[in-house]
Amino acid sequence: MEISGKKVLIFGGWGLVGSAVCRELMKHHPAKIFVSSLRKHEAEDAVRQLRNEFPNVPPETFEAKWGNIFARNDWKDMDWSEVLSNPNWRREVLDDIYCELNQEILDKSALYTLIKECQPDIVIDCVNTATAIAYQDIYKGVSSVRNAIESHSLSEEIVEKLMSSIYIPQLIRHIQILYKGLCDFNVKMYLKVGTSGTGGMGLNIPYTHSEERPSRVLLSKSAVAGAQTLLLYLMARTPNGPLIKEIKPTAAIAWKRIAFDNVIRKGKPVQIVDMPFEKAKPTVGTFKFNDTDGVVETNDTFKSVFIDTGENGIFSRGEFEAISALGQMEIVTPEEIALYAVHEILGGNTGKDVIQGLDAFTLGPTYRGGFLQSYAVEKLKELELENNVESIAFELLGPPRLSKLLFEANILKHCVGSMKNLVNFSAEEISQKSLEIIKKNVKLRSQMLSIGLVILLPDGKSYLRGKEVKIPVQGSQAELELTQENINQWCKEGWVDLRPENFNLWKTRIKAIMEQIEKQIPNDTSSRYNYTRQYWDNFEGFNEGKIVAWIFENEDQGWRFKR
């Protein structure tokens, strides 16, 4: 259909993909773009940027809208936990989800009200619905209910909160309200930018949320995304409704900016903490989750070089290199997604509309993404040098094992200098050198502790920790036994392990990488090999991100072959 002269409503218009869609739409002269986002300042910021970028169109071409489209209009600007804390509102939430759909529910819905107010010709939905629904974490809710049952303290509040977090009823109600809004206000086209939930990887995805692999919460996101796609497929088969399309990226979407600034987690800068060596805790007894004795507040924030990937958060250079490496999630750019989306709206055949081919038309990693990845990495390295920092890991990508491996690789780099030099040192020598490094390099040590990593010292008898820890994952217990079996498991999952046996493992890994290259036919310059001696810089360096990506592919079997 034509975009020129039409009104377009964009859900998630401030985000990485949404902002790219806005810019792409402007090439086709829409009459008006409603930019909707969760928060007022986000929507207004997006509109301000668009007005600055397109000064030759009337300012009223862009209008900001905001609020939680999954809530009632009265609650759209409130924190969801605040809504669920009110007993009366909580019951109304359950009514909105579980009662038969009626006009009263529609009229109170923020989503329905937004479509009614804007009356657009086209709706482009860039909100990650699967994340919004699945990350309410029903598993945690079930655990709370079971604990309450066992302790004979089951309350209405606990049960109602669990009921409000069940995924499929929420998704069904969302789709029902969406469809009614599209039909009632004569919207001609709805295009969804969806998700696979795993960046295109399979059940062997090595990125989790500190749970088992594959993560139940992550797979819930994929399940909701798949269910939503099938519901949209049914909408597309319903006569007299709008045209329905979905673009489903199956790679990490990057990027919005590259910068040196505060590392933000859950909307706040990560606070730098430390633990002096004299406060190191013995690896005996139990591991207490709330044991922060000896943890020192530095009154400083974690600043580093990062790449901003929008909704997925900010990644360090090491994290970005790992997740974007060949065989990992790899990347697709928001501009490409926007181009495909707008082309589909215009009636083009991109081959990427999954409503037409549920399992055949996913948008995977791209040539442009691969081409620009090297630029992004070089820019990250340039800013590292400029700001005299090492961008290693922020523990925002997950799992903690990724951060642990990146920091261990970085420590190894400081110890031996290069992959080639590693053979010249024994595991015991490296272990001792690593201890000296983290003693002297307070910044490196503090960064590890501040993002939730625990450092096990070379003797295995004491450890350093920060205010919070990622591993072990705290369930219903306040403390866990510090057995050797538990310590070994925690080291595998996320503790930075400075014991000699761990550095023996690292020596084995680097040897395996070098042997892979040595087995290649020397004069074969074809496209046969993914990784060559040049990829590994002739083993003269120690690239943390590349090495960890290799570990995920070869050791953890976390790789992709479909793109």
Image: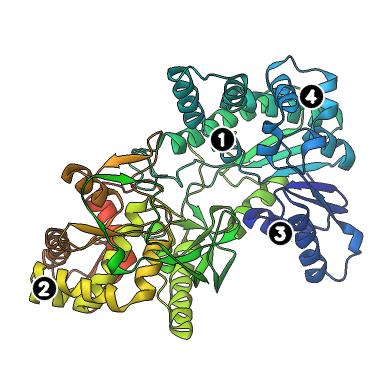
Instruction: Point out the residue furthest to the top here.
Output: 100
In the rendered image, residue 348, in percent from the top left (x then y), is placed at 67, 47
**Above or below for 84 versus 258:** above
Tell which circle, 2 or 1, labels the residue nearer the N-terminal end. 1
Tell which circle, 1 or 4, labels the residue nearer the N-terminal end. 1
The amino acid at mark 1 is Gln
What whole-number distance in Å separates the C-alpha atoms at marks 2 and 3? 56 Å
What whole-number distance in Å separates the C-alpha atoms at marks 1 and 3? 33 Å
Bin the neighbour count of mark 3 within 10 Å (Cα to Cα): few under 14, some 14-19, many 20 and up.
many
The amino acid at mark 4 is Asn
Q: Which residue is mark 4?
A: 240
What whole-number distance in Å separates the C-alpha atoms at marks 1 and 4? 34 Å
In the rendered image, residue 549, in percent from the top left (x then y), is placed at 31, 58
**Above or below for 305 versus 395:** below
Q: Which residue is mark 1?
A: 136
The kind of secondary structure element at disc 1 is loop
Using residue 474 as the reference point, say whether residue 306 is left or right of it: right
Q: Which residue is mark 2?
A: 429
In the rendered image, residue 202, in percent from the top left (x then y), is placed at 37, 40
For residue 330, which numbered disc appears in the image? Answer: none
The amino acid at mark 2 is Glu
Q: Which residue is mark 3?
A: 24
The kind of secondary structure element at disc 3 is helix
Tell which circle, 2 or 3, labels the residue nearer the N-terminal end. 3
What whole-number distance in Å separates the C-alpha atoms at marks 2 and 1? 47 Å
